[in-house]
Amino acid sequence: MRQHGLTRNGELIILQRFHGGVRTNPARSGMEVLSVLFVDVETTGLLPGSDPIIELAAALIDVDVASGEVIAHHRTVSWLEDPGRPIPPEIVRLTGIRDADVRGLRIPDAEVRALFGAAQLVVAHNARFDRAMCAARFAWLRSAEQPIWGCSFSQIDWRGYGHRHGDLESLGKDHGFFFDAHRATLDVEALIKLLALRPDVRGAPTYLAELIADSRRPYWQVAASGTPYEARLELRARRYRWDPEFKHWYAELPEERLELELDWIRELCERHGAGRPLACALPLAARFDAYFRPSWEPR
């Protein structure tokens, strides 16, 4: 990993404060242009449907698919909403949003729907959380015609590029800038700034190009069904998650890794004397969707 902001003598790291804004590059002929909506929410807690959104920010940009360069910035918006209950003190400390700031305010549903309707891809830094929170607030986001989502936390190999931490603040500092985090407007524009950069790999496109390419790849869900309790540590180490509805461990992976992963699950089940692999194709629009229910098939 190249350390951005490192002085020539290697003794100091200089970080620049990011005040907001989106830098663009001129469009060139022959580009495939993708409209991308960056989204960030601040909430009263972590439970969709129980902990309301108190701030929603979004930035709509156009991106050259091949390079991942931002070629147009249409708008950045931010809305506050009264949750109908006192904001917990820890959320006030984290976000700076107080009860008086949101009293009587409501996010305009029609404007939000128009913004999502203009996008071909929605990006958040923890898309599983942001998508669930948005879908709980805006039921129309659960419909099939809504754009696909991308996750800048999980779809970019930050560890492979040498970054120890994947949160937005840490990644910003690794790339030479810092900002006032946990205010949604700055968060979305800081994320655009980050993803418009390139990893320290010769000839590599931007991080955003990597995310877009992964968002178009076929993905599958695989599950280890019926495995004993003792197998949980191996499954966790392989980044499987527990599904309390189906009561099994599952993971998502690109199609080209499917057969190898099914072989691994079979070997795990044989060693522990119980269990079987299951699989389900994951529609592009269902990625990071808490409301998606797989149709599992034995493999």
Image (tube, rainbow, N blue to C red):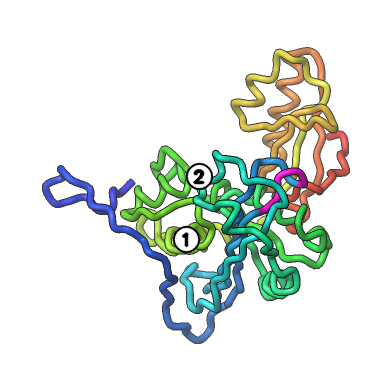
Magenta-drawn segment: 49-53
Report crowding for label 1: few under 14, some 14 to 19, many 20 or more residues within 10 A (C-alpha).
many
Q: Nearer the viewer, residue 136 or 210?
A: 136
Q: Residue at x 65, y 52 (%)?
A: 130
Q: Residue under label 1, please give it.
A: 186
Q: Distance between the residues labelled 1 and 2?
A: 14 Å
Residue type at numbered disc 2: Leu
| Left or right, 28 with reference to 177 | right
Q: Which residue lies furthest to the bottom in this view?
A: 29
Can you tell which of label 1 and label 2 is closer to the viewer? 2
Q: Which residue is drawn at 76% across and 17% down?
A: 270
Q: In which quarter of the image is the C terminus?
A: top right
Q: Which residue is drawn at 66% across and 25% down?
A: 235
Relative height, residue 272 to residue 56 (above, below): above
Query: Which structural element holds mark 2?
Result: helix
Q: Which residue is drawn at 55% across and 76% down?
A: 75
Q: Residue under label 2, please give it.
A: 94
